[in-house]
Image: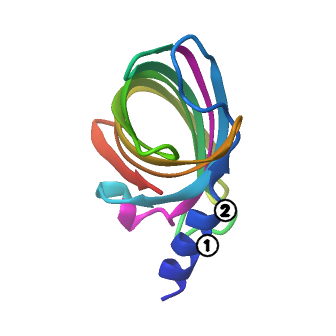
Amino acid sequence: MKRVFIIISIMFIASNAFSITKSGDTNFGIFGGYSTLFSHYSNDLNDSFSIDLLMQPLIFKNFIIETNLHFSSYNLKESSGSFLNMYSLGVGPIFYLPLLNSFEIQSGFHANINYFFLRATETKKEINAINPGYRIISRFVYHIAHGIQTSFDISFNHKLLSSQSFISLNI
């Protein structure tokens, strides 16, 4: 129940401020969310908060090129003070469909390069890894006023870490 409350709270908090999507604009945004693991690593790591910085530098009619900088920090379940930080840089196409005057649906994918940093306090080890991945995105956008919009985002993320799939769902 606590997890559901957190997800619903983040849905209302997760908003961004960038222009109404139209050709020729450049949009910027910031997102806050919740990251849930669905892979081998879900046994060892707690779910996490996530932060995304977004730039849409090229906007065409119903098509956007988007760049994204993502950060998540996962605590290890069995080791107090140990954590895995993940930084991702992604780029990819986003397709959008305006609905009515104020709503928009966006969907697309990113190719990512991911940097993982693990600090294990009990063994006093630090491990770094850089691996590719991808992200599939669905976004529901509501335009509040010119230059301000809020959105609800869901993204499926797949990366490799130590030859194991690192899969997360971000809301």
* Start-end of magenta stretch: 42-58
- In this view, 26 is above or below 73: above
- In this view, 63 is above or below 162: above
Q: Please tell me which residue is depicted at 41% across the width and 26% down the height of the picture.
A: 131
The prevailing secondary structure element of the residues shown in magenta is strand
Please state which amino acid type lies under the numbered disc 2.
Answer: Ile
* Callout 1 secondary element: helix
Is 147 displayed left or right of 71 in the figure? right
> Residue 158, position in %: x, y?
32, 40
User: Across the whole image, how many numbered discs are drawn on residues?
Assistant: 2
Q: Which mark is residue 13?
A: 2
* Callout 2 secondary element: helix
Q: Residue 55 versus residue 100: which sits nearer the camera?
A: 100
Q: Which residue is mark 1?
A: 9
Q: Is residue 75 visible?
A: no
Q: Are marks 1 and 2 in contact (CB under 8 Å)?
A: yes
Q: Please tell me which residue is depicted at 54% across the width and 85% down the height of the picture.
A: 2
> Residue 14, position in %: x, y?
62, 56
Is 14 displayed left or right of 159 in the figure? right
- In this view, 55 is above or below 49: above
